[in-house]
């Protein structure tokens, strides 16, 4: 879900979409459910598949992808097989690679087409390439993303 919500948006925007999804469709957690801002569980695949998701400020095509992915997770014989996810309209290589990196903890994922990675590489004075990051390119990716959140160092 996070990978789909993060398509073509900033990390901050993806986080806000994720929080909105949980707030709207997630069930309240335990005793805290009586609180106005009770912590919530992540929504079930059933809840997401059944919702129109109109509360999410993103293109309809991406909301449709979230619902298709939820249906896939409910009905596919191998729902956790990331290779099969690309058969779903709206899920491509970036989304699957991101899921491998963040969800499965694969330490060597390089998101070459990611706009944030391209921007960070242009801003660094280091001679970084995909090859120079092996076998820890996922960590390099995360560090490059993090570098975009920090102001540049003054000379």
Image (tube, grey):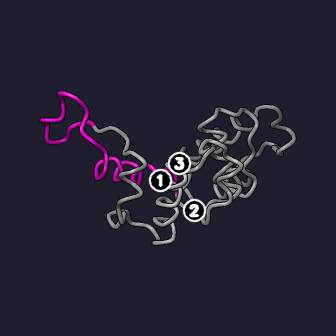
Residue at the image position 57 percent from the left and 62 percent from the top? 8
Residue bounds of the magenta highlight:
10-39
| Residue that carries the numbered disc 2 in the rendered image | 8
Instruction: From the viewer's perspective, tell me whether residue 96 is left or right of residue 44.
Output: right
Figure check: 32 above or below 144: above
Asked whether residue 154 appears in the rendered view, the answer is no
Q: Main secondary structure of the magenta part?
A: helix
Instruction: From the viewer's perspective, tell me whether residue 145 is left or right of residue 17.
Output: right
Q: CA distance from mark 1 to mark 2?
A: 9 Å
Regarding mark 2 in the picture, which secondary structure is present there?
A: loop
Q: N-terminal of the two: label 3 or label 2?
A: 2
The x, y position of residue 10, in whole percent, is: 52, 56
| Residue that carries the numbered disc 1 in the rendered image | 14
Q: Nearer the viewer, mark 1 or mark 3?
A: 3
Q: Is residue 72 magenta?
A: no
Q: Quadrant of the C terminus?
A: top right
Residue count near mark 2 (Cα–Cα under 10 Å), binned few <14, some 14–19, many ≥20: few
Contact flag, marks 1 and 2 (Cβ < 8 Å): no
Residue at the image position 28 percent from the left and 53 percent from the top? 24
Residue at the image position 72 percent from the left and 32 percent from the top? 107
Q: N-terminal of the two: label 1 or label 2?
A: 2
Regarding mark 3 in the picture, which secondary structure is present there?
A: helix
| Residue that carries the numbered disc 3 in the rendered image | 73
Contact flag, marks 1 and 3 (Cβ < 8 Å): no
Asked whether residue 67 appears in the rendered view, the answer is yes
Q: N-terminal of the two: label 1 or label 3?
A: 1
Res 137 quadrant in image: top right
Figure check: 88 above or below 77: below
Q: In this view of the protein, which residue sits in the foreground, 17 or 45?
A: 45
Q: Nearer the viewer, mark 3 or mark 2?
A: 3
């Amino acid at each position: 879900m996070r990978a789909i919500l993060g398509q073509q948006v900033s990390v901050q925007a993806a986080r806000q979409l994720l929080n909105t999804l949980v707030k709207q469709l997630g069930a309240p957690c335990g005793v805290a459910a009586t609180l106005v801002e009770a912590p919530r569980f992540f929504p079930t695949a059933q809840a997401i598949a059944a919702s129109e998701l109109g509360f999410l400020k993103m293109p309809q095509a991406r909301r449709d992808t979230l619902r298709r992915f939820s249906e896939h997770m409910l009905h596919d014989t191998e729902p956790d097989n990331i290779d099969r996810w690309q058969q779903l309209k709206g899920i491509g290589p970036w989304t699957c690679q991101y899921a491998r990196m963040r969800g499965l903890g694969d330490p060597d994922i390089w998101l070459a087409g990611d706009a944030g990675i391209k921007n960070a590489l242009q801003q660094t004075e280091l001679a970084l390439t995909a090859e120079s990051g092996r076998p820890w390119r996922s960590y390099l990716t995360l560090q490059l993303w993090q570098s975009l959140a920090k102001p540049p160092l003054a000379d």
